[in-house]
Image (cartoon, rainbow, N blue to C red):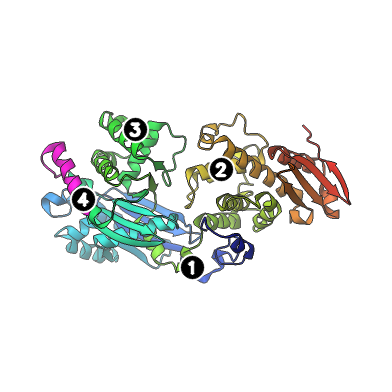
Amino acid sequence: MTADRTSADRALGSHDWDPFGRPLFEDPSARALSRVGVVDVGSNSVRMVVFDGAARSPAYFYNEKVMAGLGQGLAETGRLNPRGRERAQSALRRFAMLAREMDIETLTVVATAAVREAEDGPEFRREIERTTGLRLHVINGLEEARLSAQGVLLGWPEAEGVICDIGGNSMELAEVRNRQVGARISLPLGPFRLQEIKGGKAALVAHIRTELARAAELIAPDHQRIYLVGGSWRAIARLDMERRGYPMKVLHEYRMGAQCVAQTVAWLGRSDLDKLRAATGISGSRMDLVPLAAQVLRELVHLYHPREIAISAYGIREGLLYEQMPDRLRRRDPLIEACRHAERTMARQPGFGKKLYTFIEPLYRNAAEARVRLARAACMLHDTTWRAHPDYRAESCFDHVTRANMGGLSHPERVFLGVALLHRYRNSRAGSPLEPMFKLLDDKTLREAEILGKAMRFGAMFSIHDPAEAGALKLFPKKKVLELHLTPKGAALFGEVAEARFAALAAALKCEAVVIHDGTRKKAQRRK
């Protein structure tokens, strides 16, 4: 869903992109993508991922990684690392067997820089096919850049900027604009390659700058955002979180500024990496590559001067899934699709989220589209943790949305949804152990999340099947009045608890709560 959708578009309500239009899981082309297996044979790691669930925002049904180190020493020997070959072969044998056990008909396997550049790469491919039955598709640097960029588009349909994917032996850059992948380039700037540069730090920095200058000739340094793909970048982001005392540990959509990157690179240079590895859970083999990757990142940021650096957990593997999607599926909002799938599989009354949003929609008549989008998402998620113990439903809701694997959702938006869902089950958030995360929102946004939560808290219990059958809300912001117009059915349903929750919603809006029935107006009462 785009931010510039017009009010006329919103009124139509039946287009394919509409969150309450035809569910994606009813589409045969989406069901065909419901379980897809891919393997990425990289220079450093070999990973198998099986996607399942909502095709536009898939869940990771299975995810396993082996840090094989296939490309270690390649720049010096020209051959795959012998120990890395053994580990990769073992991993691929296992992955082939797992795919058969999961009834995955086709397991797509791609190999990147190490296999394509090694003189024994063709021999390795033949051996893998002979021993496992898997066919390795060796992709060139430009294809690798395109797939990484498509992976970013899976999570950010509106992504604009430069995608930078760092592997063990190479680094790929691609330009994305208007949902299209543009100019691309592959550079020998992976940490394994940089380990072979002689002449100390000065020679290393000069080499990095020379290679990046080649990229700048093709992809102009005039972009506001860089999207970072790859394990080494994610490790640096995790370390940045540690340095800043950041309250959330979700790496996808984590944002850094240029100054933040400079401070973290300097901090890493004077820190004990073994202690940092123990504190963050980063593997030893990954941490060994972090100092070199950090040098590349510092020079990349210095060259491109982005306003923002965003971490993407999506890359080549997600790009392979995106490749198989028809364009109309690609245009679906990944957040909305994830929420719809969650409601369908986890809620007591799938489909009630639409009715709940329709009931509270008068509160959002003049709201920005970004806020409407979150309100719709929240309504679909409002009941998905109903099986949790009643004493922990509020925290469970918050925990689920702030940690769930969902694309198209920034960290502040995660917290916004979390706070709204917390208030769906609890009137107050005071004293919550989740308070450190609330700091990602300003006071105004926290209040908006509370209002949404209290609106859902009232609407969800007002009527079992459809709150619109019981009444209608009308908001008069200038008069500071919130009215509830009761139907005859609603008059019977508007009991003491319902009245208290309606009054609490009005109080959050800083409005007078007025109930209208049979031409009679009366103020709603808040009972403690």
Q: Residue at x 50, y 42 (%)?
A: 412
Task: Using the rendered image of the protein, determine whether residue 100 is visible from the camera's viewpoint.
Answer: no
Q: Is residue 333 above or below residue 399?
A: below
Say which residue label 4 marks.
213
Check disc 2 and report the residue beneath it: 416
Q: Are marks 4 and 2 in contact (CB under 8 Å)?
A: no
With respect to residue 518, does 261 lie above or below? Answer: above
Quick one: 257 or 526, which is closer to the camera? Answer: 257
Task: Point out the stretch of residues depicted in magenta.
Answer: 195-215
Residue occupied by mark 3: 278
| Label 1 Cα crowd, 10 Å radius (few <14 / some 14-19 / many 20+) | few
**Cα distance in 3D space between marks 4 and 1:** 37 Å
Q: Are marks 4 and 1 in contact (CB under 8 Å)?
A: no
Q: Secondary structure at mark 3?
A: helix
Q: In percent of the image, x 35 and y 44: which residue is there? A: 234
Tell me the distance, in whole angstroms, between the alpha carbons under discs 1 and 2: 28 Å
